[in-house]
Amino acid sequence: MKAIITGGTGMIGNLILNHCLDSAKISEVISLVRKPKGTAHAKLKEVVVKDFTDYSQHQALFQNVDFAFFCIGVYTGQVEDELFKKITVDYAVEFASALKEKSPKSTFCFLSGGGSDRTEKSRTAFARYKGMAENQIHDLGLNFHSFRPAYIYPVTARKEPNLMYRFSRTLYPVIKLFGDNVSIKSTELAAAMFNVAMNGADQEILENKDILTHV
């Protein structure tokens, strides 16, 4: 089987990439990157993509794909709104469209986010644009699963992107006491996305509590 992933150098994407490399059922893994990470593995092919809205030079990579993972993302406030929308919506939809054209029977797992708004009316850009991406991918008719985690606790320590995430990491022992709706470990999210790709799920939209049932 063949898997393709974008965002394989990120917190969740890298964990999913490792699941794919460790799986005896997957013989080929394509990782689309902006800059090569240099991971050496017999199954892995890293491909540098200059423009994630244009896969015209990479069509062959999408042929005979069984599983696809889209894990590119940017935190609110890191970039201007126009670029935030481009990364959140356009990158995801163009990746899904290339997949639909060359491997229409593949399974597509999309890293969305809690609160995503499919009415596309939310005042919060993150919720509005994630909902917009979900809608457009849904309309392509792929075997599509969207994962909407709440707070993601990074199991491996990292430099947190902003003050809110630094507080959340510190307060995680308290946060997790509020149950399955409010937090998930990075390792749990990655495992669930991989497991759904391999085994399927009844829902197209998986909220935080649903994701945890697939760990």
Image: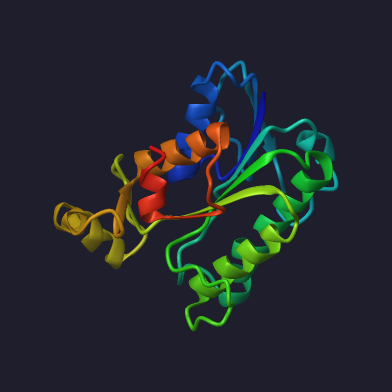
**Residue 35 placement, left or right of 195:** right
> In the rendered view, would you say 37 is above or below 160?
above
Give the residue at x 53% y 69%.
79
Taking depth in this image into account, of 91 and 49 the one nearest to the observer is: 91
User: Residue 121's spot in the image, x, y percent?
Assistant: 56, 82
Taking depth in this image into account, of 165 and 195 the one nearest to the observer is: 195
Q: Quadrant of the C terminus?
A: top left
Taking depth in this image into account, of 130 and 117 the one nearest to the observer is: 117
Give the residue at x 32% y 55%.
160
> In the rendered view, would you say 43 is above or below 54?
above
Give the residue at x 71% y 51%.
96
User: Residue 213's spot in the image, x, y percent?
Assistant: 37, 43
> Is residue 153 in view from this perspective?
no
The total of numbered circles placed on residues is: 0
Report which quarter residue 63 is drawn in. top right
Taking depth in this image into account, of 7 and 152 the one nearest to the observer is: 152
- Of all residues shown, which one is farthest toward the front? 202
> In the rendered view, would you say 100 is above or below 121?
above
Give the residue at x 47% y 78%.
124
User: Residue 29's spot in the image, x, y percent?
Assistant: 63, 28
Report which quarter residue 43 is drawn in. top right
User: Residue 73's spot in the image, x, y percent?
Assistant: 53, 57
